[in-house]
Amino acid sequence: MKKPKFRELGEALRALFGGPYTSRFPAEMPEVPEGFRGKPEYQEDCIGCGACAQVCPPGAIEQIDDTENKIRTLILHLDRCIFCGQCVRNCTTEKGIIQTSQWDLATFDRSTLVEKVERKLVLCEVCGAVISTEDHIRWTAERLGPLAYANPSLLLASLSERGLLEEAPPPAREKDLVRPDRIRITCPRCRRETSLIV
């Protein structure tokens, strides 16, 4: 039998008196480095634009537009999330969704791994198509400043938000679009149709 080497004997003595080398994980959470990509989390600054749902590689973010109730729901399924950070990187406001340092998401109940955010939708007054959310339109108008007055949809949305526009149901759509339909909150397709009218 070979005699133990001094290096192996030294390692055994250090392990015996020095304590465990590994972290005491369930009892103590380890510190995560700065820039660690942990669990994504929606913030109050989320405008509901849906950019995060469009760029999510595993499809962990689901966008549901309920046109009857005028609600857009963004559902983040953390059990499908790969923590890639594309949602954070492509966020329109850069503050709507962030990645936390939380990484330990082990659970027996998958329903706890779901986060939701709801925003009010704005629909086209002519055809009823989804334009965007109220928060998204407000954010765009604020970013554009005085230039927002060149877009009738942004102008009408900001006026109605300030209470300067009388709330009235949109008139029923006639057979064809007419020039005055330009001064309504319309989707790009309906706006293009009214622009082509001579």
Image: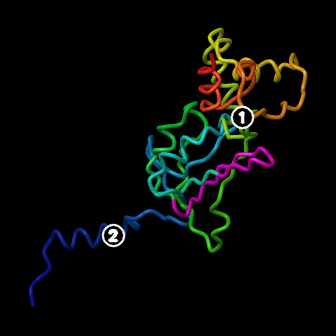
Magenta residue check for 74: yes
In contact (CB < 8 Å): disc 1 and disc 2 = no
Task: State the image quarter where residue 197 is shown.
Answer: top right
Q: Earlier in the sequence, mark 1 or mark 2?
A: 2
Query: Residue at (55%, 64%) from the top-left corner?
Result: 79
In the picture, measured across the screen, residue 81 lies left or right of residue 189, that is: left
Give the image location of residue 26, x and y in percent: 54, 66
Graded by Cα atoms within 10 Å as few (under 14), some (14 to 19) or many (20 or more), the crowding at tag 1 reads many
- Label 1: element kind: loop
Check disc 1 and give the amino acid type.
Cys
Check disc 2 and give the amino acid type.
Ala
Give the image location of residue 130, x and y in percent: 67, 40
Magenta residue check for 110: no
Give the image location of residue 175, x and y in percent: 75, 34
Q: How is the image coloured?
A: rainbow
- Along the line of sight, the residue nearer the viewer: 105 or 75: 75
- Label 2: element kind: helix
Query: Residue at (48%, 50%) from the top-left corner?
Result: 56
Depicted 65 relative to depicted 173: above or below: below
Graded by Cα atoms within 10 Å as few (under 14), some (14 to 19) or many (20 or more), the crowding at tag 2 reads few
Q: Which residues are magenta?
A: 64-80
User: Which residue reaches farthest bottom?
Assistant: 1
In the picture, measured across the screen, residue 150 lies left or right of residue 69, that is: left
Q: Nearer the viewer, mark 1 or mark 2?
A: 1
Instruction: Determine which residue is flagged by label 2.
Output: 15
Q: In which quadrant of the rendered image does the N terminus lie?
A: bottom left
Instruction: Determine which residue is flagged by label 1.
Output: 124
Tally the numbered discs: 2
Give the image location of residue 123, x and y in percent: 73, 37
